[in-house]
Amino acid sequence: MSTLSTSLPGGTWTLGDLTVTRFGYGAMQLAGPGVMGPPADRDGALAVLREVIDLGITHIDTAAAYGPRVTNQLIHEALRPYPESLHIVTKVGAIRDEHGGWPPARQPEDLRRAVHENLETLGLEVLDLVNLRLGNAQGPQPGSLAEPFETLVELQQQGLIRHLGVSNATAEQVAQARAIAPIVCVQNMYNLAYRQDDELIDELAEEGIAYVPFFPLGGFSPLQSSALSAVAARLDATPMSVALAWLLQRSPNILLIPGTSSVAHLRENVAGAGLSLSDEELAELDKIGH
Ligand SMILES: NC(=O)c1ccc[n+]([C@@H]2O[C@H](COP(=O)([O-])OP(=O)(O)OC[C@H]3O[C@@H](n4cnc5c(N)ncnc54)[C@H](OP(=O)(O)O)[C@@H]3O)[C@@H](O)[C@H]2O)c1
């Protein structure tokens, strides 16, 4: 097992045998508009990735579907040879259509192709952690994950994947996956204002499984709430900082993967996530999502 000391807010978490900083980075925003095509500012995107490493972040979330292939290629170009401490997490289970949609692609051959596409575009021989992305753009959808998840287990047994997780999943699908093979994380939508998974987060914490909220800052429509703005103003902080600090304090198994295409925002988010929120502030923020 690797050890890692960090001064980043939140400290570290261990995914299986991989230690990562709880403050990670989500690379999706590095692709072009609508997560299609290359970024308008390519050098800026590469600079953000290098800053991620300079700040000591060791967890990057990506997918071959971003761009498609664009964010993986940027990560490859900016960061190879990868620092030993860095762990890149990918997801499979959706592809892109010509309109920028995200149709599911979860047949065994789709998943094999996607794993190899991630390996190739990232320049890796093994993927540290692959999430099976379920549901659709509307969110998690009920249904068995047995066939696609077993396909990923086979690829894991072949040595192409170290650890598995699920994404955009219902609590039932999380339980079903765990009955088939160990998972180290669940990546679902969750933030101050969208708290569908409160119960699941607490259950996973007890089992030592990470919960990785996507859209921690609200995603394509930034979090807006008068209560959030009021707490932020009182603390002389930005609403983004408060939203990230709240997630870190919400549960020790929560890992952050906020996205940004800006070095300044990345630095601001790292600095802001270390805010200490009092019980009174936490209670005030709690009301936003209830
Ligand atoms: N599993 C899934 O289905 C799924 C779905 C969606 C996303 N994800 C993952 O989750 C990660 C996070 O999601 P996300 O990036 O879409 O949403 P997010 O982290 O909630 O928000 C990103 C947005 O916030 C803005 N932002 C970040 N820091 C800011 C700051 N300090 N001040 C002002 N604006 C700021 C960014 O704009 P700027 O670029 O201008 O900073 C960007 O538009 C993604 O990168 C991806 O890896 C997974």
Image (cartoon, helix red, strand yellow):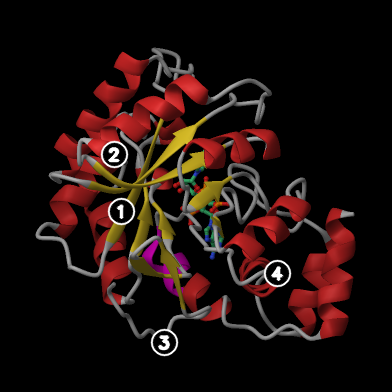
Around disc 3, counting alpha carbons within 10 Å, would you say few (fewer than 14), some (14 to 19), or many (20 or more)? Answer: few
State the residue position of label 3: 7
Q: Please give the name of the residue rendered at 81% of the width and 75% of the height, measured from the top-left corner.
A: 282
C-alpha span from label 1 to label 2: 16 Å
In the image, is residue 81 part of the stretch drawn in magenta?
Answer: no
In the picture, the disc for residue 156 is: 2
Residue 238 percent location from the top left of the image? 65, 72
State the residue position of label 1: 88
Amino acid on which disc 1 is placed: Ile
C-alpha span from label 3 to label 2: 33 Å
User: Nearer the observer, disc 3 or disc 2?
Assistant: 2
Q: Is residue 29 above or below residue 121?
A: below
Q: Is any atom of residue 69 visible in this view? A: no
Q: Earlier in the sequence, mark 1 or mark 4?
A: 1
Q: Is residue 249 above or below residue 33?
A: below
Q: Please give the name of the residue rendered at 37% of the width and 66% of the height, measured from the top-left corner.
A: 263
Per the rendered image, the range of residues in magenta is: 262-267
Secondary structure of the residue carrying numbered label 3: loop
Secondary structure of the residue carrying numbered label 1: strand
